[in-house]
Structures are given as structure tokens and as C-alpha cells.
Amino acid sequence: MRRTSPWVLLAACLLSGLAETGQADEMSAVEHQRETIYHSPQKPGFTSWVGAWTMPDGSLMVSFTQATGPVDGRPQAPKEVQHKLTWPPPGHPGYDMTGLDLRNVHLRSSDSGKTWRQVSADGFKSCMNGVTNEAQTALADGSILRGVFGFYLPYDPNLPQTGFLQRSSDGTKTWSKPEVPIDAAKFSTWPRRIRVLRDGRIVLLAGVASAPAGSQTRAEFSAVVEPALLISSDEGRSWNSPVPAILAEQRGGWTEEFDIAELPNGDLLTICRRANDTKRWQSTLKKSDDTWIAQHAGPSVLPHSGQPELLATREGPILHIATSGIHWTSDAGQTWNKLNVPGTAYYPRSVQTNDGRIFVFGHVGGDDAYGKVDQSIVMDSFRLVAADIAVTDRKLLPADTLVAERIPLGELDDYKPCIAKLPSGELLLTAFHQHKRDGNKVMEQTLLFRSSDGGRTWTGPQPLDMLGREPYLTVLKNGTVFLTGHLLAQDVRNEWGYTTGFLHRSTDGGRTWQSTRVESEQIKPKASNHTTRNVLELADGTLLLGVDYDGGGGPYFVWRSTDGGQTWDKSQKCEPKEFKSQYGFFGGETWLWQARSGKIWALVRVDSNELPIKDRPITAGNDQADHFILFSSADGAKTFDRIRDLGDYGEMYMSLLRLQDKRLLLTFTVRDLNPPLGVRAIIGNETDDGFEFEFAHDRIMLDTRTPVGKYQGGGFGPTVQLDDGTLVTSYSYRGEDDKTHLEVVRWRVPAHQR
């Protein structure tokens, strides 16, 4: 089944002060830099009113107004135009653009802002700047949609004297005829933003006055304008009636300057301002079916500084970007926190690119009239980072928080990712997506992502034509890749009538695969079966894979291969002692490990209602009753002895990693009686006979994104270590939208205090 392209947004949103509730307390910016990307051919130059957006191919686009020409001796606007615009504005005679060469300049960068080229500069006639540029975006087909304030274009009688839209299908070189979005006989509009919602609809943010186009002067329009939303479901071909952004009892005194950010629940956070006010105002538009209902607007803690700008980072926090500084919120505007970067240029416009970098464009030189102060277009860029990995019950680790970088990927309802590193350094990540079918039927599709830059950016997903859910990767020393999983009985592709395990093998980095199904007929007809998560590569090159049958009831087998997994000896039975669990010995997420002594260890997830932690009874059921038991074998995995309980209740999905400093990293998922849910890590030591971990201290809270009250969110937590020591952990979490989300976190393991 083909899937739509993912939003692979690769930003690093890291929050510090993360308590057990998962609440974010602090964010910071790194790699901040500012550079000039354009200056007009004349000095002093006038460049202003920036727009910014990304194209479907990932390139950046910037637009702005440029004025060139002499300061003195220019013709003035006709008297009727001066009257209509209340011209010149009192105290601002230099705002007169009459007689200047005015152009909408468009720049494009295909290398993440390193270099820029001018692609167009269409001319227009006006008395004022601010005609267009700020309301522009790219559509899915690569065409560009822009909004224009026709009120400022009084020299061309063929242009509407209200807000209109234009399209370009050639990268801004040419533009279509004007398209007026709403009835010009009833409304005058000023387009200020074009935003695309998660569901694909387009929102045109506009100042709207209930008066026919051309019937008002600029001052009269400003006195009655109100912020409103126009919504289109057909890429801007048609629009609904204006949706007020302000309650009826609060109307009056607003400007057309406002912005929105879409919240996870579909509500819209709004920032706006009143005329002659020194503060921002904010409110929430509550989603109601296909529209929104305005709520009471109140003054924000944010000061007025230029025009409002909101950027919803796709990993969660919302930025308010202004000349006076950048602030962020993680609670829909209830609290705002200052980011550690200086203020931006004037009238900023911001975007976030696929590599996670945030770009802010604007002009420097002041909000001044043409001909007095030199102005140019500048670009600020940075990444968001924070110390958002908390360390609880710290004993040996040196700090309570660890700096990290979080990178979302995939689509909603992608689930349980696993990450692995090839000998070349390339990273593979698998997950699966569940497509619901009628009744209890499903179709669970395995997906493959790739990264060549240490997990910062990812390609994919590539749907794999293979069967099985919860795909888990193992990479051998020679680069052979194994993927384990199981196909549910209710999957529409299951022709056998029972849950069955699969082992997939690739010798070309996951580009092609050979599949082996775990058959049951020779053991017990239609007996469900599972395998261990990992394929264990012994010191002598022998491969081991644990297999169990009958829903955990047994029998249990250990498959062996001495030719890299091309063939398997499936005859060896396995006898675990003191074992009874509904999950089975190998089917309940068992991890196999070889100690330096040669012993085989099995870390097994068990149902604690049947195998409770010794001297610690529990009355809970389901996942909350699960925990780990360690088993050891001295006879090559023919028999296993129960060694000890590990960890606490509510723990599952274990993965072990030998670090470069020879310590061991154990990651696992918590579905505890006490929130938050998510992925944890602890650092232990390898011994000659196995390993040891102290679960009571130094828990690294890798993921706490699933909100309190959600039963589960996936977790998983497999981890790889890059050559430079960076760790990359994969997991899924359940959001406020009740959908699962994929994410990786890049972090570093600290040294223990000695």
C-alpha cells in the first residue's frame, strides 16, 4: 500500500527541567548566526516587508519590496490618490513611494541558506510599501500563492481595490490575474498571512472591513478593520465567509496584524494587536467541526514589536518571533519563556526546514522611510536545543539533566521504531503503520527510513513488501541485516489462521530481503509462534534465534546458523527452568546476550501475575504487572536457569548496547502504575559472567512525551552509538491527539562519577 510522503521534520526541540510529569521548563537556541543575504543596488537602500516559505523540494524562498530612485524631485501621487490613502501620513512624509521603481524581489536558496540567487523582480506602482510579499506560500504542486493589498495599488484601474490573490507556476517569474477571495461588494480585505493546516486546508489571515471595496479611505478602513480567517479546501480556488478572530463584544480598535499557530487538538492560538497598544493580545480559536469559534482575547505578556509572527515547530513548542526577542510556549500560550537569542530584524518571517533549522528573515536599518536609513535583508538561523533528558534518583551520573536533540519523523500512527547502524555508518530505522480494516481486521505495513548524517535527517518511508509487526533490526559484524517480527492472526494478509513469526535477511543494507516464516504445522497445527527480538551473533560467528510456540505454552527451540543465516538448524529444543508466563520464554520480548565467559543470557519479559517479583506482590494486571527476569545458560542455550529479577513492575521492550567505553546501556519502556510512560535507560557494567545494572538509581528519562492518562504510547527505545560517541535512540509516543508519533533523540552518555 502506498502512503503519502511523511513530514520529515527534523528540528531539535529539547526541553529542560523535565520532571516526572514531563513538563517542559527551559529551551535554548544553538548555532545562532546572522548574515546579510541582500542589499539593493542603491545606497541607501530600501528593502522591506519580507515573506518566507519553503518549496516542496526543500529549498527556501524569500520575497520583499525594493524601492530605488532619487530621494528628491520625484512626482507626487495624484490628489485623488492622496485623499484615498490619507496621504501623506501625518508625521511620515518620507513614506511616499510615488515615482520610485518598486519591485517584488524573490530570492531562492537550494543549499539551506548558504547561497542565494534572485529568480524574479516584478514591478508595480504604488505610493506605499507593504503591497505584497508577506502573504506567500507554496502549494503541494509547487505553485506559489500570494496575497496582495490592492488598496495600495491605485495607479492601475484594472486591479481590485481590495485584497486579492495571485498564482505563479514558474517560481514567481510570472503571475496570474487577480483572484478576489470574498465578495468585494460586501468586504474590503488586506491579506497578511497564508497558512497551511495539517489537514491540507489553506487559511488566509486577513484584515476584513464590512464595506465595499474602494468605498473607504485608508483611515476609514483602519478604524473598522477586524482580524478574520478565510478558509479554502481547494487550494485557494474558493473561500468560505470570514471567520471572526475576535468576539463580537470585543470588536473595534484592532489592526489587521495578527497570526495563528495550529495546536495539536486543532485549536488555533492567535496573537494580534490593538491600534496604539504597547502589548500583544492573544486568544484561542476553538475548533468546531470544520470551523473555529472565537474566544475572549486578553492582553499577552509579550510586548508589541513590529508585526506578530508565530511559528509552530512540528515537534511541539510554538515560537513568538519579534524584533524585541523570541519567546516560546509549550502550553498553548498560558506561559511564555524568553529564548536565548537576540531580537530579530524588522517585521520578521520565519520557516523551519527539513534539517530542523529555523530561519528568520527581515530587514535591518529601522522601520524608517525611504531615503534616510540604509536597509538590507538579513537572515537569522538557529536550532532549538535543551536539556530535556532528566536523570532521576541520581547517584553516579554527574548531572540531573542531559542535553539532547529530538527529531520527529514519519506520519501519525506510525509505531514502535527500531534503529540500527550499518558498518558504513548509515542508519536504518524500521517502524510499522497499522491500517484499520472492517471488524477487527488490520493491515500492518513495515516501513524503512535511512539517515546518512547521524539521525539528523531521514529519507523515507520506504514501504517494505514483507510481513510482520514490531520489526526489530539486528546488524552482524559483516553488515548482514536481520529483521524479526510477527504477523497477527487478524491481519488481512495472514493466510495461515494464527499469529506467526518471520525472520527477514538482507545482505545489501536493507535494499532487498529474503524471508523465512516460522512454521507451526510440524510442531503443533495452527499454534501461534514468536521469535526473540534480536538475532545473537556468538563470538565464533554462530547465530542463535529463540522460537516458541502455542502462545507461550511451548515447546521452545533455539535455531542455529553457521553460514550467516542462509540456513538454520531448527532442531534444538530449549528447557527454561522455573518458568511460566503467558508470553512464552522467547515470545515475550526476550533479549539474548553472550557473556565473556561464553554463557548465554536471556533477559525475558514475563507476566508478573504468574511470575511476580520475589517478595513484592502486585495486584495490577495487563502490562502494569510485567517485569524482567534474567536467565542464564552454560550449555549453549539448551537449558536456562533462573538467576534473578531485574527492575520493577511495568517494564518491557528491552535492548542492550555495548558502549565504546565498555559499559552497557539498557533501554526499556515503562508502562508503570505511576506516570510518566515512556522510554528509560540505565548504564551498567559487563562482567566476565554477564552484566549488572542498578535499577534504583540514575534512571535516564529518554522519553516522557506520552501525556498522563494515556495507557500506552509505544516506547521501544533501541539505541545505536555513532563513531563520535553520540547516541541515537528511537521510540514512539502517544500525543494529546491520541495518535502515535515517531521520534529519535540524539544524546551523549555521561561518565559516572567515581
Image: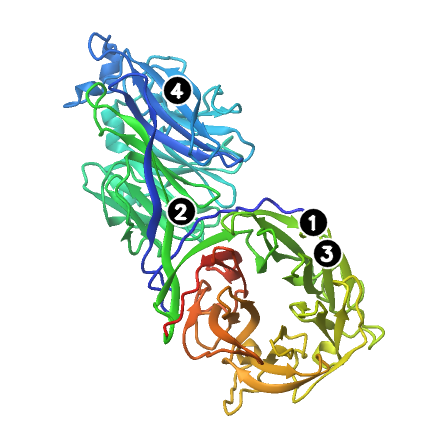
> How far is the residue under mark 2 from the one under mark 4?
33 Å
Query: Mark on residue 466?
Result: 3
Q: Which residue is the site of mark 4?
A: 160
Q: Check disc 1: other Cα within 10 Å, few if <14, some if 14-19, many if 20+.
A: few
Q: Earlier in the sequence, mark 3 or mark 1?
A: 3
> How far is the residue under mark 3 from the one under mark 1?
12 Å
x then y, percent, for residue 505: 72, 58
x then y, percent, for residue 685: 50, 75
Would you identify the image quadrant in which residue 435 lies? bottom right
Q: Earlier in the sequence, mark 4 or mark 1?
A: 4
Q: Residue at x 65, y 87 (%)?
A: 641
The type of residue carrying mark 4 is Pro
Asked which secondary structure carries label 3, the reply is loop
Q: Check disc 2: other Cα within 10 Å, few if <14, some if 14-19, many if 20+.
A: some
**Residue 409, visible in the rendered structure:** yes
User: Is 30 situated above or below 389?
Assistant: above
Q: Which residue is the site of mark 2?
A: 312
Asked which secondary structure carries label 2, the reply is strand
> How far is the residue under mark 4 from the one under mark 1?
56 Å
Q: Earlier in the sequence, mark 3 or mark 4?
A: 4
x then y, percent, for residue 490: 72, 65
Of residues 245 and 674, the one nearer the viewer is: 674
> How far is the residue under mark 3 from the one under mark 4?
57 Å
Q: Which residue is the site of mark 1?
A: 511
